[in-house]
Amino acid sequence: MTIPPTPAHAGLEDVVIGNSSICFIDGREGRLLYRGYDINELVEHSRFEEVVFLLWHGRLPNKKELPEHEKALAASRKLPGKVLALLKGFPRKATPTEVLRTTVSALSLYDSDAENNSMEASFRKAMRVTGQIATIVASWARIRAGKKPVPPNSRLSAAANFLYMVHGKKPHPLWAKTFDMALILHADHELNASTFSGRVTASTLSDMHSAITSAIGTLKGPLHGGANEAVVRMLQEIGEPERAEVWIKNALAQKRRIMGFGHRVYKTEDPRAAHLRRMAEALGRQSGNLKWYEILRTVERVVGEEKGLYPNVDLYSGACYYAMGIPVDLCVPIFAVSRVSGWTAHVLEQYADDRLIRPRTEYTGPTHPQPVVPLDRR
Ligand code: COA
């Protein structure tokens, strides 16, 4: 019996498992860079489509490349007819994240490159799945509500098109801008749990759809993508701004984990939270309803005072989607609509310089062979 040589790192905290040039996080200073570009700059000066190009190619597109790239992405939004039929057959009570996980897996059955794992084919699959995920999420939102899915509109940006497919009408410019910013801010985050699981799958030289399916399954958990949905449910439970302080103090006294706070890497405020806070306020002002924003401000103050914890990306994102009339349980799949750009970039990077990811555990069971007592004597 060989004993693992290194001590266990619970949760793989601070363990570096390889090189990557995609995303840099400075957890002490609260900085986040995609391919060397600060997200504060990207959010001000670029669109989600540009960020997708940046993540995949390592540089920003030029004036000729961007329209070509946008056209290719828009052309990939349509779902195969059989996949749409599959969606229509799912039980209406299925959660949007389960539906997304299952449907992305099914997409490979209809993808002409399914079993072709060359870099060129994997890139084509990255393009297709990035376009299709938004259509799956929006179509399911309508199908389960008994409405006809709205086909994608290739003249709209990724952000505006998603809202169009959910609501069946072109969105207010502030909504489209806000959603575009949210997509940029969620696009990548180094080796977060879902990206890690996507890379583990890719490291076996499994295919793009399998890797993205693994990532979606990992994103689903409340300690990862599920936190923004939990924040909205908390807002609904608190109900009114004047109840927020007492509610949160009680929750902390009961040692409840407050969703939207804390982070494995950031030891200060998550830089994405500041933009989402600003957007939540702008949406509240536009709709004349600042209630959710005000509750969150109080929650943020009390959790900071009592626990010294900072907000993460999830504190304000769910409130933004909620303000745009998006059903609460779409929060996690929307995370995937954006993060698929980062997942696919990481899968491509993994393929380009692959080594099987296969860590060890610190074994704590018996090391001397145990006698197997026959069943009738156990
Ligand atoms: N609410 C209350 N306490 C929290 C907390 C939260 N959101 N996040 C961390 N803490 C506390 C823990 O209770 C623990 O305290 P203790 O040492 O007294 O037991 C301490 O901070 C460290 O927490 P730990 O869970 O060990 O940190 P981690 O690095 O493993 O966890 C998260 C990181 C993100 C899982 C954690 O902060 C969390 O659960 N946050 C809420 C979920 C969330 O918003 N997720 C989205 C992340 S982008």
Image (tube, grey):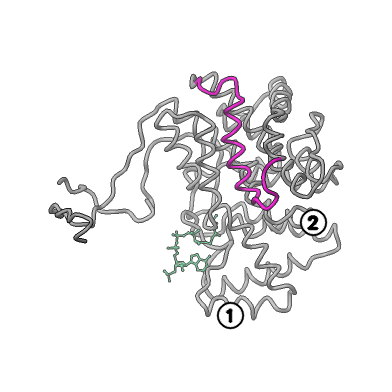
**Up/down of 12 relative to 290, above or below:** above
Point out the stretch of residues depicted in magenta.
Answer: 89-116
User: Which circle marks residue 283 in the picture?
Assistant: 2
Q: Where does the image place residue 374, in percent across and percent down from the top left?
A: 19, 54
Q: Which mark is residue 250?
A: 1
Say which residue appears at 70% left-offset and 50% top-offset: 92
Disc number lying in front (2 or 1): 1
Q: Quadrant of residue 280?
A: bottom right
Query: Is the residue 230 above or below the residue 142 in the image?
Result: below
Along the line of sight, the residue nearer the viewer: 298 or 205:
205
Earlier in the chain: of badge 2 and badge 1, it is 1
Indicate yes or no whether the magenta region holds residue 176.
no
Vertical comparison of 285 with 238: above or below: above
Identify the residue shown where x is 60% and y is 47%. Answer: 98
Quadrant position of the C terminus in the picture: bottom left
Circles 2, 1 touching at the beta carbon (< 8 Å):
no
Q: Pinpoint residue 78: horizontal percent, then vertical percent.
A: 72, 29
